[in-house]
Image (cartoon, grey):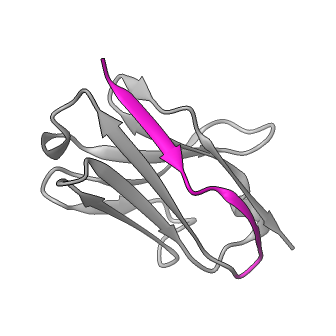
Amino acid sequence: QVQLVESGGGLVQAGGSLRLSCAASGIMFSRNVMIWYRQAPGKQREWVASISSGGITNYADSVKGRFTISRDNAKNTVYLEMNSLKSEDTAVYYCYIPGNWGQGTQVTVSS
């Protein structure tokens, strides 16, 4: 049974930083691409960043240069370091592996 558990969300002022974590279990973590999505109120869920099993990263244009995705295969955990946060980054952030979603963690950026 695959489980993805996000943590690290919260309330932060614009310009601040947060680091999200997603702990995975029930999968061969090191062999899987790991992906972060987000969903703002009233909007569709959108892709934020992904990291391949080999460590290749990709980012949405809206977060490029501000967010960094990384993984620790020894801890079965993927991270999303978010810097220079803007009010438009306010959303529920979800960890995703094909076929499975985490429960999400709320990020609120106050202006």
Residue 66, horizontal then vertical, whole percent = 52, 76
Residue 94, horizontal then vertical, whole percent = 53, 41
Q: Does the magenta stretch mainly form a helix, a strand or a loop?
A: strand
Tell me if 101 is positioned left or right of 27 in this view.
Answer: right
Quarter of the image containing the C terminus?
bottom right
- The quarter of the picture where residue 44 lies is top right
Residue 79, horizontal then vertical, whole percent = 40, 59
- The quarter of the picture where residue 41 lies is top right
- The quarter of the picture where residue 29 lies is top left
**Start-end of magenta stretch:** 1-15
Residue 37, compared with residue 1, is above or below; it is below
Residue 43, compared with residue 13, is above or below; it is above
> Magenta span has 28?
no
* Residue reaching furthest to the right: 111
Tell me if 79 is positioned left or right of 33 in this view.
Answer: right
Q: Residue at x 25, y 26 (%)?
A: 26
Q: Of residues 103 and 34, which is closer to you in this image?
A: 103
